[in-house]
């Protein structure tokens, strides 16, 4: 059994659910994530802005390959050329 209501502390909508051992636990509505006050489980929908900034977590060069993968491919190709032509 569950109830949907607003949290008394942060005002977000929560789902109070009765667990098998009889204890009531608050979850964010329509999720299985336990409720934490002031934290929204859903990402806020905002306008998608296309930027020309480089993503620092996975840098890529102009051909679309990650920079590390391009370096590895280059080293392997140079190694094979050296092996076959030396």
Image (spheres, grey):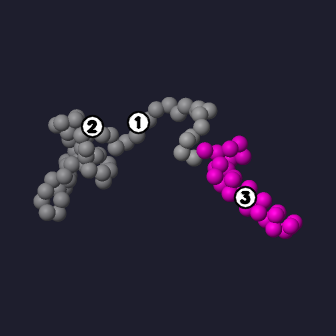
Residue denoted by label 3:
75
The residue carrying mark 2 is 38
Q: Earlier in the sequence, mark 2 or mark 1?
A: 2
Label 1 Cα crowd, 10 Å radius (few <14 / some 14-19 / many 20+):
few
Q: Residue at x 25, y 44 (%)?
A: 36
Q: In the drawing, does residue 5 fall left or right of residue 75?
A: left
SS label for mark 3: helix
- Mark 1, residue position: 44
Q: Residue at x 50, y 31 (%)?
A: 47
Q: Which residues are magenta?
A: 59-86
For mark 3, does the 10 Å Cα neighbourhood hold few (<14), some (14 to 19), or many (20 or more) residues? few
**Real-space Cα distance between discs 2 and 1?**
14 Å
Q: Residue furthest right?
A: 85
Q: Position of residue 61 (x, y in %)?
A: 68, 44
Q: Nearer the viewer, residue 25 or 85?
A: 85
Residue 63 marker: none
71 magenta-colored: yes
Image marks 2 and 1: residues in contact by CB distance under 8 Å? no
- Our reading of the magenta stretch's main secondary structure is helix
């Amino acid at each position: 059994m569950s109830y949907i209501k607003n949290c008394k502390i942060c005002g977000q909508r929560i789902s109070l659910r009765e667990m098998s051992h009889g204890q009531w636990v608050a979850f964010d509505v329509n999720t299985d994530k336990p409720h934490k006050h002031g934290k929204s489980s859903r990402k806020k929908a905002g306008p998608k802005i296309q930027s020309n900034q480089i993503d620092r977590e996975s840098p890529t060069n102009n051909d679309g390959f990650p920079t590390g993968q391009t370096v590895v491919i280059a080293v392997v190709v140079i190694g094979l050329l050296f092996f076959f032509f030396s």
